[in-house]
Amino acid sequence: MPTFISVVAVAVNAGLALAQTSVTVNVGSTLQQIDGFGVSQAFGRANEFKALASTPRTKGLDYLFSTTTGAGLTIIRNRIGSGGSGDSILPNSPGSPSGTPSYVWDGSDSGQVWFSQSAMSYGVKTIYADAWSAPGFMKTNGNQGNGGWLCGVTGKTCSSGDWRQAYANFLVQYVKYYQQAGIPVTHLGFLNEPDWVTSYSSMQSDASQAASFIPTLYNTLKSNGLSSVKITCCDATGWPNQKTLTSGLVSAGMEQYLGVFTSHMYSGDPNSPLSTKLK
């Protein structure tokens, strides 16, 4: 793993007097493994990027991904759409969980296909596909927004039936479309901030509910020859909430199915490691 050494000089202005402080970095002491840094262009931002004139578009890509003139980012996070036509690969309900889905693929995915391919041309290899929500017809509230739960998870039933397998099929089909476009999705998530309810794409879940879906997704990936895709969970709003989710998932034996635990930092910064053998 590359080691980055920074020497920081801190200048303090106190009555025109400058004091310098040096920082010594011990490269022999490993504190944290960093796999990389990344970017997302979800919710149509990739299309806006693509629509730029050639010169600023290329310069923008250089700034993001070039290892000589830019940040050298190495991770892409794409959103798996859950809305209607133009957003989701399954804009309409098949009528029931066992109904035949009419998937729709436009080859663009709101510009995210172009953005992923562009990033890969710079050497990016980590492509993370994450769903903020299941399609509304698979949820308890019938809406892709405003929270609600996936029908069939622990404690949540719907008159339309159990949609867990249908949701797993939906996610795997998305991965297949990217594979056909020459983009190997390396990580797949089925939740985003399950501890937060918003008017846009959002879906709630606790650890036991996530655990009632994860094996289904794992087995669906495996049966479709996609065992190399790592399942992630759960992109909580902050570290404290993710620690709670992680503890529950570990206790439920989910580490055997998952590849990575994921979290945001909006509601709490990382202040201690997650209690897991996974990343």
Image (tube, grey):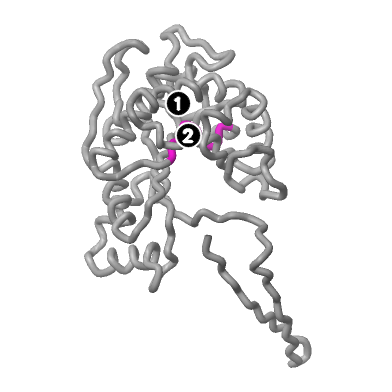
Q: Secondary structure at mark 1?
A: helix
Please tell me how crowded label 2 is: few (under 14), some (14-19), or many (20+) other residues with Cα within 10 Å. many
Q: Is residue 235 above or below residue 119?
A: above
Q: Is residue 145 left or right of residue 271?
A: left
Residue at label 1? 218
Q: Main secondary structure of the magenta part?
A: loop
Q: Which residues are magenta?
A: 187-194
Identity, as a three-letter code, of the amino acid under mark 1: Tyr
Callout count: 2
Label at residue 79: none
Q: Are marks 1 and 2 in contact (CB under 8 Å)?
A: yes
**x and y percent of residue 242 in the render?**
63, 38
Task: Say which residue appears at 72% left-offset and 47% top-offset.
Answer: 272
Residue 200 visible at all: no
* Frontmost residue, 129 versus 133: 129
Q: Determine which quarter of the picture holds residue 236.
A: top right
**x and y percent of residue 219 in the render?**
43, 22
* Frontmost residue, 163 versus 127: 127
Q: Determine which quarter of the picture holds residue 220.
A: top left
Q: CA distance from mark 1 to mark 2?
A: 7 Å
| Residue 190: in magenta span | yes
Task: Say which residue appears at 67% left-offset and 46% top-offset.
Answer: 268
Residue at label 2? 231
Please tell me how crowded label 1 is: few (under 14), some (14-19), or many (20+) other residues with Cα within 10 Å. many
Task: Say which residue appears at 38% left-offset and 18% top-offset.
Answer: 166
Identity, as a three-letter code, of the amino acid under mark 2: Ile
